[in-house]
Image (cartoon, rainbow, N blue to C red):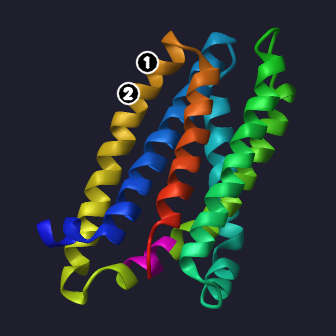
Amino acid sequence: MRTVLANVNFRRLWISQILLALGDALMQMGLLELFHAHHLDERAETAKLFFAVSLPGLVLGPVAIAYLDRWQRRGVLMISDALRTVCVVGILACLLPLMAGPITQRNLLPVYLIIGCIGSITTFYLPARSALLPNLVEAGDLVKANTLFAASLAVAMVGGRALGGFVAEEMGVTWAVLANAVAYVGSVALLSRIRM
């Protein structure tokens, strides 16, 4: 593992992915806290949330893979993170007026549509990340790099959800969503420093 972590370019990608996993988990828990605080049907709203994230992958997955072979992978990652930052800020803009009054399922439709946009962008992001990894590490270190990625992202998701629940409950949903935007900006900064 030391040889993998000694690789500066891999380390930047790895840290950016941990940031993104933490940010996504924070926002997810923030939205769950929002559903709970406004006495919405948490199970139904959570199902809508996951549907909005997952559906674009089913529809756009084959198209994304076909186009990714033609594009520079690091650029796809950076543009994707920048676009997802804009989407998260859009979610925040939709939520701010709602938090002052009652929230209904109809009020959340724009949030779910934006989350669907994030899912669409992620459909291009994930294969580009997987395709970039072999360009950053030696062939003999690829299994170690993938293992480190998988284990780290799992820990970050669990830790991010625990932290997200705390942040959303103690500091508010706004901070949980804002933390995700900051994570995307941090990821763009790290990815921009990867040298091919």
- State left or right for residue 110 relative to residue 115: right
Please tell me whether residue 8 is drawn above or below residue 54 in the rendered image.
Answer: below
> From the image, which quarter does the N terminus lie in?
bottom left
Label placed on residue 162: 2
Q: Are marks 2 and 1 in contact (CB under 8 Å)?
A: yes
Q: Is residue 178 magenta?
A: no
Please tell me whether residue 15 is drawn above or below residue 155 in the rendered image.
Answer: below
- Quadrant of the rendered image containing residue 178: top right
- State left or right for residue 33 relative to residue 133: right
Q: Nearer the viewer, residue 91 or 191?
A: 191
Number of residue marks: 2
Q: Of helix, strand and loop, which one carries label 2?
A: helix
Q: Of helix, strand and loop, which one carries label 1?
A: helix
Residue extending farthest to the left is 2
What is the crowding at mark 1: few (fewer than 14 residues within 10 Å), some, or many (at least 20)? Answer: some
The residue at the point 44 percent across, 77 percent down is 195
Q: Nearer the viewer, residue 143 or 72?
A: 72
Residue type highlighted by circle 1 = Phe
Magenta residue span: 129-133
Q: What secondary structure is the stretch in magenta mostly built from?
A: helix
Residue 1 seen in the current view: no
- State left or right for residue 63 relative to residue 136: right
* Residue 82: percent from left, percent from top: 67, 56
Residue type highlighted by circle 2 = Ala
The residue at the point 75 percent across, 54 percent down is 117
Give the CA separation, mark 2 to mark 1. Answer: 7 Å
The residue at the point 73 percent across, 31 percent down is 92
The residue at the point 69 percent across, 40 percent down is 48
Please tell me whether residue 66 is drawn above or below residue 42 in the rendered image.
Answer: below
Q: Name the residue tied to disc 1.
A: 166
* Residue 2: percent from left, percent from top: 12, 66
